[in-house]
Amino acid sequence: MKRQYTSPHLTVFESELFRTTSTCIVTDAYLLLVDPNWLPSEIKTIQAFAAAQSAGKEKHLLFTHSDYDHIIGYGAFPGFKTIASQRFVDNPKANEQLQQTIAWDDEHYIRRDYPLSYPTIQHAIAGDGQDLRIGPDDYRFYQAPGHNYDGLLTFNRSRGILIVGDYLSNIEFPYVYHSFAAYRATLNTLETIIASGEVQILITGHGDHTTNREEMERRICKDRAYLDGVETAVRSGQPFDFAKLMAGYDFPIVMGAFHEKNLLVAKREFEG
C-alpha cells in the first residue's frame, strides 16, 4: 500500500480506490489511527504497521465521518479506543451506512477476515473547539457538517497536524450530501484554523496532503467558488458550466454524477 507521507511520528497511507487516505500518528505513548480503509490487503498493511508501532502504547481509532468508505476497516482493529463526533453516534443513517459497506463488498466479491459493523464510539465529541489530551499531545476538535451530517475536524496542535476528512481535496470539488450552508460554515472554520499559522500539514480524505499554507488557502477559495457557482445556477435557473469545471479535474463520468447530486441538494436547500 502506498505511503503518501512518512515521518517519525506521522504516516499517511493511500488506497488505490478513490485515493482515500488513512492517517496514523505515533508517539512513545500512543498510536492514533484515522479512517483505515479500503481493500482487505490494504487493511492488512495498516494492521501490520499499527501492530509494529503500538506495543505497550494506548491505541486510538478515530473516524472523521460515517461515510461507508471511512468506516469499512473498523472491525479490523478490536481493542482500540474509538473517537468520533456525537452526531456520528446519533446518526439516524447508521444502518444505511453499514448496508453500503456490505453491499460494496458483495458487489465486488470481497471477503474480509473481520466483521463489518457500524463503529461503537467510546469518546464522542459533542462540542465545537473541544480539547482532548492524548499522551503528550493536545488535540482540538471541530464539528464539520456539510459534506455529511456528522463530520469532525481533528487538529493535533502539538504537531501541527490537521486532519479534515472529505474537505479541501485537491482532486475533488465539494461533494455536498448534507447542506451547502453547513459546508460553507465548515470552510470558515478551516480558514480560521489555517490562519492561526499553527498548521504544519493538512491531510484530506481523498487526494494529496499539503504542507503549503498558500495551497491550503487556495483549496478553500476553489471550494467556495464551486459552491457559489452551484447556488447561482440553481437560483437563476441558468445551466452550470460543468465542462469548465472539469478542466481542473479528472474522471468526468463519476464526477458528473456527484455534481448532479449536488444540484439536487442545492435545489432542495435554495428553492425550498
Image (tube, rainbow, N blue to C red):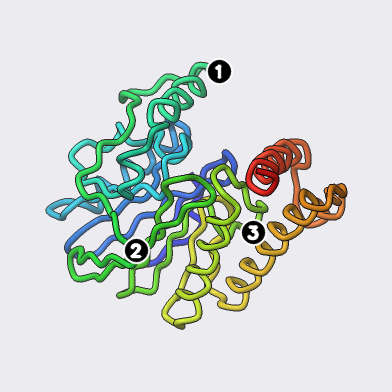
Secondary structure under badge 1? helix
- Per the image, the residue denoted by label 3 is 170
The answer to whether residue 182 is left or right of residue 245 is left
Do callouts 3 and 2 mark residues in contact (Cβ within 8 Å)?
no
Q: Residue 122 in the image: x percent, y percent?
A: 20, 45
Which comes before the other along the chain, label 3 or label 1?
1
Quadrant including the C terminus: top right
- Per the image, the residue denoted by label 2 is 128
Q: Which of 270 and 187 is in front in this view?
A: 270
Q: Is residue 116 above or below residue 13?
A: above
Residue shown at 62% from the left, 72% from the top: 215
Q: How crowded is mark 1: few (under 14 residues within 10 Å), some or many (20 or more)?
A: few
The answer to whether residue 205 is left or right of residue 180 is left
Query: Based on the displayed image, in which of its 4 quarters is residue 259 positioned?
Result: top right
- Mark 3–mark 2 Cα distance, whole angstroms, equals 26 Å
Which comes before the other along the chain, label 2 or label 1?
1
- Mark 3–mark 1 Cα distance, whole angstroms, equals 28 Å
Q: What residue type is labelled 2?
A: Asp
- Per the image, the residue denoted by label 1 is 107
Q: How crowded is mark 2: few (under 14 residues within 10 Å), some or many (20 or more)?
A: some
